[in-house]
Image: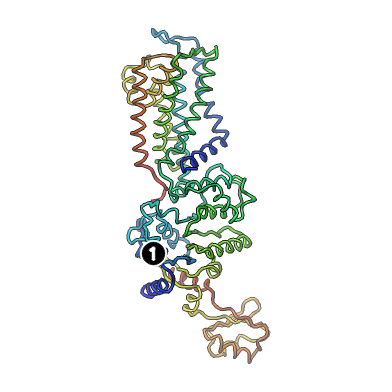
Amino acid sequence: MSEVEELSVVDAVDAGSTPAIVIDGVSKSYGDVHAVQGVSLSIGQGEFFGILGPNGAGKTTLIEIVEGLRDPDAGRVSIFGLSPHPRNPALLPRMGVQTQKSAFFTRLTAREHLETVAALYGKDAAAAQRALTVVGLDGSANVRVTDVSGGQRQRLAIASALVHDPEVIFLDEPTAALDPQARRDLWKLLRELKAAGKTIVYTTHHLDEAEALCDRVAIVVAGKVVSLGSPHQLVNAAGLPTRLLVAVDRITVEQARAIHGVDSVTVEGGSVVISSRNAAKVLAAVAEVAGLDGVQTRTATLEDVYLELTGTEQQ
Amino acid sequence: MSAYAALTRASFKASVRDTATVFFTFAFPLLFLITFGLIFQGREVDDTGYQYIDYIAPGVLSWGVANAALFGVAFSLMSWRNDDLLRLIRLTPASIWSVLNSRAVVSLLVSVVQSVLFIGVALLPFFGLKLHANWLLSLPVLVMAVSAFLALGVIVGNFSNTPEAVAAIANCIIVPMAFISGSFFPLDMMPGWIEAVSRALPLRYVNDGMSFALNGRGDLTDYLVALGALGVYTLVFGAIALRTFRWSNKS
């Protein structure tokens, strides 16, 4: 498996732009816990790269090693050809980091917090104002950081990562705790950042989001990359069945089972659900029995691939 | 704005907006002054020609200034690290130096306001402090005292992960030190060995400097030795602070 992954890494880098980030054989253990085990991958400049995986899979440890916050036990990381660890002041202004736990200066307002962060990067108050506007927090600029709502905290944390106009942006579960509208607003922002040529590395639990936004994703389970590629590639490669939903009064379970190429048949929510890896052929057979009116087709999503991969690995 | 100026501004705003802490920072030493003033009012220390207030005023003030500097920076540093703010700063090009010094101006300002309030109250006829002509010499003492105890506070902050730990460690350092250094009781009344031990403690030198400035006790040599000793403590504590500094609770 890992050989396949490495090949696809090389392909992606050769085909795409020069890598912004190269992770080479990185491992990190805490006592008996092997948080990250021999992860290698490259992320191209301008790429939107997702790191997916269950809680405790080592995503945050991996991303913190890349950011230079943790020193790996083995392997090396380079960002724009520079090592992030030990602390590298030449590299830091080119990186923007939003952490899971939002860090804000005590008892300051949103604007004051951002102005402080801007100044730490040697930027002026205008930079803070721009970041505030980009994330849509103008209306809450003068609210104390402790008093802003959950969604606003998230956006303020992202603004803190953008204030100095970095080239590569790390986001750790940026849409956790956001309501659906706020999440879509953030997608828009992330797409704009990508359009502006930023390299974005982010972790998420939302598979639909990764599918909608990411150029490539790596699925991490138990500290290892178990799958790497574009969401489309991963869905195709997984060879998961397509599901056809036919109203119960149009076809019986027995009729459905009789169709050649059907893997399984269940009844869910008023529909006979037919799973098949040969959807085209089965669909033709269903058309003969029940007609195609109202037949719904559900192809596998990244979420199915993810559940398949993380489920197997955890057993 | 430089990173140092920005962090100083952030510290300043955080401090003045915490009104309860501001109030008690100033009220705490006054409370001691009033207590000791009531106990020892008008009494002279045997064979010295000085009144108790002449010992207690500079002593309690020294303790108050040292206490505020020590606790203030230790709490800020611990909470900045716990809130991942140090991690945020770690990811910017700002220097450790600007982080460690960001509270210096705030602490110095606190100590000046503390002193003005405190001396103002001690000068009231009830307490009967008479200010010596040297009083302006208390300013260099304040600067050196804040520097030394700020550096000590950074060390405490480096080793503490919770507010409870800061309080426990800082109190264990400052309370015995205050007694042994003669902040609350005149050293001249204590056994000789305590006087000897006090020479190893930074607060002793704050007391010496303050006593010379505020009521002319001791001579210029004592005063200069006090300033020099506090300079040495600042360097030693500063070096340890730098060595033990942690950006994060995690490794």
Q: Is residue B149 left or right of residue B26?
A: left
Q: Residue at x 53, y 63 (%)?
A: A196
Residue B205 % position (x, y): 37, 23
Residue B167 % position (x, y): 46, 35
* Residue closest to the far bottom: A288
Secondary structure under tag 1 reads strand
Q: Would you place residue B28 above or below residue B39 in this image? A: below
Where on the picture, by quarter, is residue A95?
bottom left
Q: Chain of mark 1?
A: A
Residue A15 % position (x, y): 42, 74
Q: Residue at x 35, y 65 (%)?
A: A24
Q: Is residue A42 left or right of residue A119?
A: left
**Closer to us: A244 or B94:** B94
Residue B162 % position (x, y): 46, 42
| Residue type for callout 1 | Val
**Closer to us: A294 or A196:** A196
Where on the picture, by quarter, is residue A298?
bottom right
Q: Residue at x 56, y 54 (%)?
A: A154
Q: Would you place residue A267 above or below residue A75 in this image? A: below
Q: Which residue is mark 1?
A: A22
How crowded pointer 1 is (Cα within 10 Å; few <14, some 14-19, many 20+) is rated as: many
Q: Would you place residue B227 above or below residue A131 in this image? A: above
How many numbered dots are placed on residues in this image? 1
